[in-house]
Image (tube, grey):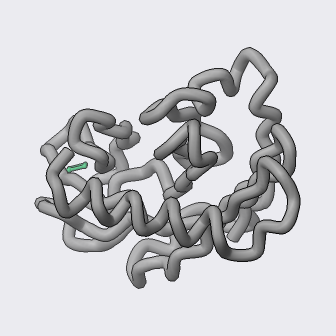
Amino acid sequence: MERNEFLRLLGTAGIAVCAGCSLESCSSSSDPAPSGNPGPSGIDFTLDLTAPANTALNSDGGFVYNSGVIVVCLSASLKVYTAVSQACTHQGTTIGFDAANGNFLCPAHGSRFSTNGAVVNGPAATSLRKFNTSLTGTNLRVFA
Ligand code: FES
């Protein structure tokens, strides 16, 4: 992870922890979505972080796919998550999360996207759609 990306993640974490949280174990992310790919529509689902299928979301860099969205745990200790459309905007390949570099990576042709879905490097020219996340207890809601 590069220094700038690390500092940006810390800034996001600070905002998520401070903004709108009055209960324990609560965080949210509502960074403005970059313009670009509309991504899947009608997204509004909740993931139970205690369910075996979602255990990856309890570790830094862990991720799961659901309903055309990739959901990533950016910081387990700070309860910071991000969610973007999982289809690469270049040719639709399913992206993954590269925890070592702190960004999304498309295995087909190497496009990279920031944690808010913006293109870091191509060939993709259009950002991924970013979705909101909100944690209440152990339930992580992902929504448009
Ligand atoms: S399909 Fe993702 S970079 Fe080409």
| Whole-percent x, y for residue 105 in the image | 26, 44
Residue at image position (51%, 60%) is: 13
| Whole-percent x, y for residue 131 in the image | 60, 65
Q: Assign the C terminus to one quadrant of the image.
A: bottom right
In this rendering, is residue 62 above or below 40? above
| Whole-percent x, y for residue 9 in the image | 38, 59
In this rendering, is residue 117 above or below 35? above
Residue at image position (50%, 57%) is: 84
Q: Assign the N terminus to one quadrant of the image.
A: top left
Query: Along the line of sight, which residue is nearer the eye, 106 or 139?
Result: 139
In this rendering, is residue 90 above or below 25? below
In this rendering, is residue 118 above or below 101? below
Residue at image position (62%, 46%) is: 79
In the picture provided, is 18 more to the left or to the right than 48? Answer: left
In the picture provided, is 71 more to the left or to the right than 106? Answer: right
| Whole-percent x, y for residue 80 in the image | 57, 51
In the picture provided, is 136 more to the left or to the right than 76? Answer: right
In the picture provided, is 55 more to the left or to the right than 129? Answer: right
Q: Where on the picture, by quarter, is residue 23?
A: bottom right
Query: Along the line of sight, which residue is nearer the eye, 50 or 13?
Result: 13
Q: Where on the picture, by quarter, is residue 54?
A: top right
Query: Along the line of sight, which residue is nearer the eye, 33 or 40?
Result: 33
Residue at image position (24%, 34%) is: 100
Total marks in image: 0
